[in-house]
Image (tube, rainbow, N blue to C red):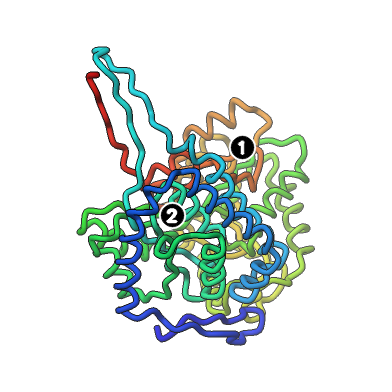
Amino acid sequence: MDSYAVIDPATGEQVSTYPVTTDAEIREAVDAASAAHATWSRKPIAERAAIVRRIGDLHIERAAELGAIIQREMGKPLADGTGEAEFSGAIYQYYADNAERLMADQQIDLADGEGTAVIRPSSVGALLGIMPWNFPYYQVARFAGPNLVAGNTVLLKHAGQCPESAAAIAAICVEAGVPEGVYINLYATIAQLGVMVADPAIRGVSLTGSERAGAAIAEIAGRNLKKVVLELGGSDPYILMSTDDLDAAVDAAVFARNDNTGQACNAAKRFIIIDALYDAFVANYTEKIKALELTSPLSSAKAAAGLAEQVDRAVAGGATLVSAGERRDAFFPAGFLTGITADNPVYYEELFGPVAQIHRVQDEEEAIRIANDTPFGLGSYVFSTDQEQALRIADRLDTGMVFINGVGLDAPDLPFGGTKQSGFGRELGTLGIEEFINKKMIRSLT
């Protein structure tokens, strides 16, 4: 890789380029982040929180400008990009406003009653974040917000097609008052990432991306005895058992599959519909996706071609495709596959774009079996008018997250993460902020 480039997927035009960080600059950055930790971690938590809150404020104040950047980089509609920047700002604000509580001592009730004991959370040092292109602000906020509040320092490597948004975040941090070395943006290469992960000065790594990238980074981290958090792919089931409002349930399904042009790890990708509702669901879903306007591209023409290849293999394997139109370069129409069975070569794959699988099931047991019949285990959605049934299904799903009778319910205080090939560890919430802190036990007999 010679440079990071902004290539507008709507036009294919190269808008700008950014030079790759040199090896010497990488060395300087790692040393600077490690050195900055000594002073940043010792600042009163209220001072760190005030700076992090200003980061959030600036994201919200500049949301339209930030949205326009990622529209150029990865094709996100301006309104969606603006909303992402605003939600990212809310994440920084939440961790700033709750910093004291989240980093408070935890008292231990001693069984022998002698003296006192506490768990005192503290930062661990310089962390490396490796981020994807599909949510350029939100993914960084999920990682950086809690960790900056906790007192860690951050080295951030963004996706190769997102250099402009990466620079914008770094500029916001400077303007917010983040001290030098506390947040550093790097246009690093894959080889440089391997060197950084192995460096003793890097105390932890968080990666959001593909299973292949996650496995490679985790292998290096494991050899060097350091913690890694991985948020990887997903093929989330959307289970519909019953509803009082089929139209609303289909609206939720359309949003869950097509938001961000279907390019979300936790998007609903497999619709599992009870037999009594299947035909009506499919007819309604077909009508709604055919009414969608094809105005936003996938992240690149390459991504669209890759999705098309998967769909072609699925159809060759016996599936039936219903599509809202024809692909044009990076513009990929919404659609869905039916009749896709476990022997189909695409059955176990993640479709990263606006194409769903739809499965007909006869009962709850079959719904759970198909939902869990995947290498992934990120999120899931259960729709039922029977709350006991919904909770019963939720309990048996092999996923990191379950949302009942709703979609788009992510929040700054809810932990995000999965199991199986979707990765391990959590971001956000109390579980997320605890991933890269030292939980020091202090016991005193006096």
In the rendered structure, which disc, 1 or 2, sits on the residue that comes first in sequence? 2
> CA gap, disc 1 to disc 2?
22 Å
Question: Going 73% across and 71% down the picture, which residue do you hit?
Answer: 294
Question: Going 77% across and 57% down the picture, which residue do you hit?
Answer: 288
**From the viewer's perspective, is 35 left or right of 273?**
left
**From the viewer's perspective, is 130 left or right of 9?**
left
The one nearer the camera, 341 or 262, is 262
Q: For the image shown, how many numbered marks are present on the structure?
A: 2
**From the viewer's perspective, is 249 left or right of 23?**
right
Question: Going 43% across and 38% down the picture, which residue do you hit?
Answer: 103
* Dot 1 amino acid type: Ile
User: Residue 354's spot in the image, x, y percent?
Assistant: 63, 63
User: Residue 160's spot in the image, x, y percent?
Assistant: 47, 75
Sort mark 1 into few (<14), some (14-19) or many (20+) by Cα contacts within 10 Å: some
Which label lies toward us, 1 or 2?
2
With respect to residue 120, does 224 lie above or below? below
* Dot 2 amino acid type: Glu
Quadrant where the C terminus is found in the figure: top left
Q: Which type of secondary structure does the marked residue at label 2 adopt?
A: strand
With respect to residue 193, does 85 lie above or below? above
Picture quadrant where residue 11 is located? bottom right
User: Residue 47's spot in the image, x, y percent?
Assistant: 49, 48
The reply to whether the C-beta atoms of the residues labelled 1 and 2 are less than 8 Å apart is no
The one nearer the camera, 89 or 214, is 89
User: Residue 293's spot in the image, x, y percent?
Assistant: 77, 68
Residue with the mark numbered 2: 231
Q: Is residue 443 visible?
A: yes
Residue with the mark numbered 1: 404
The one nearer the camera, 33 or 276, is 33
